[in-house]
Amino acid sequence: MPYLVTPDEIPLYYEDEGPRTSSAIFLIHGEPFNTKFWQKNIPELAREFRVVSMDVRGRGESGKTDDGQTLAQYARDFRFMLEALALERVVAVGWSMGSAIIWSYVQQFGEDRMVGFVDVDQRPHRFISYDDLLRRLETIRTSRLSNHRKVIVDYYGPEAEIDDELVDWMAYECMKTPTSAHRAAAYESYFADFRPVLPTMQVPARIFWTRYGVVKEDTAKLLNEGIRNSKLVFFEHSGHLLPWTETEKFNREMLSFAREVL
């Protein structure tokens, strides 16, 4: 398995497919997913472009640690991967929390090495009441597996045909993330506000939103107006799992955008 070890000695697992170039599509998964959740996308994208996907620290096959469980550190890990792999031009693709990681990267490093950005169904701000947050954290602590199954079914959306074995597999993959790391990410993400970052972005962007996802029409409009060089791409039949439920369209839109900017 390919790993890179960060300056604070955390092994980060990654996949690197496609042509050996200094430009790439760089995929960052959602929480508490991992690289395996891109398996319906990487082979098709890699026919034409180099595709790199990392397991965020604490997730998937990356090192399990309580250290650095912040969006800012995940973004620094992203920066480390770009430098270590000598990637000079990337389309940064963030699915769910992955977009928050990219926005944190822009806060810290600007858009250095980025030539494009794709937000896959992520809000820039999602404050909830503190009581609601505490209930969520308690659910993560006491009933993670059953909650993962429930959330994944919801992420599919009502039009998808549910495969119980696949839901189980996804839930078990989510369980690879330690409870402490999952709770830390949930706590921070619910108070993070990246709305001020949006107007600082200059690179071309695509905002993938869905009929049954977390980004609703008003938020899609906010993102589109906030990121000046962005376009909306609507997935009519999907929930939050759109790379799985509308794979053909997802891959087609990704390839079209990458051809424009890489």
Image: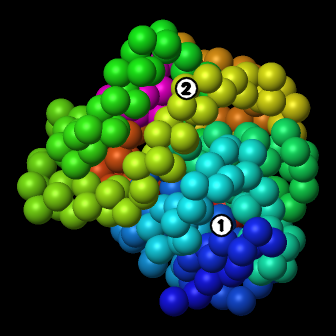
Q: How far across and down, in percent of the image, does residue 237 sit? A: 29, 38
Q: Identify the residue position indicated by label 2 in the image.
A: 190
Relative height, residue 49 to residue 18 (above, below): above
Q: Mark 2 belongs to which amino acid?
A: Tyr
Q: Nearer the viewer, mark 2 or mark 1?
A: 2
- Element under disc 2: loop
Q: How far across and down, in percent of the image, does residue 109 sit? A: 90, 49
Q: How far across and down, in percent of the image, does residue 133 sit? A: 44, 21
Quadrant where the C terminus is found in the figure: bottom right
Q: What's the magenta bit mostly, secondary-structure-wise?
A: loop
Left or right: residue 29 compared with residue 108: left
Q: Does the magenta portion include 134?
A: no
Left or right: residue 33 compared with residue 6: left
The magenta segment? 209-217
Please report the residue visible at 76 percent of the width from the left and 69 percent of the height from the top: 8
Q: Identify the residue position indicated by label 1 in the image.
A: 25
The reply to whether residue 214 is visible in this rendering is yes
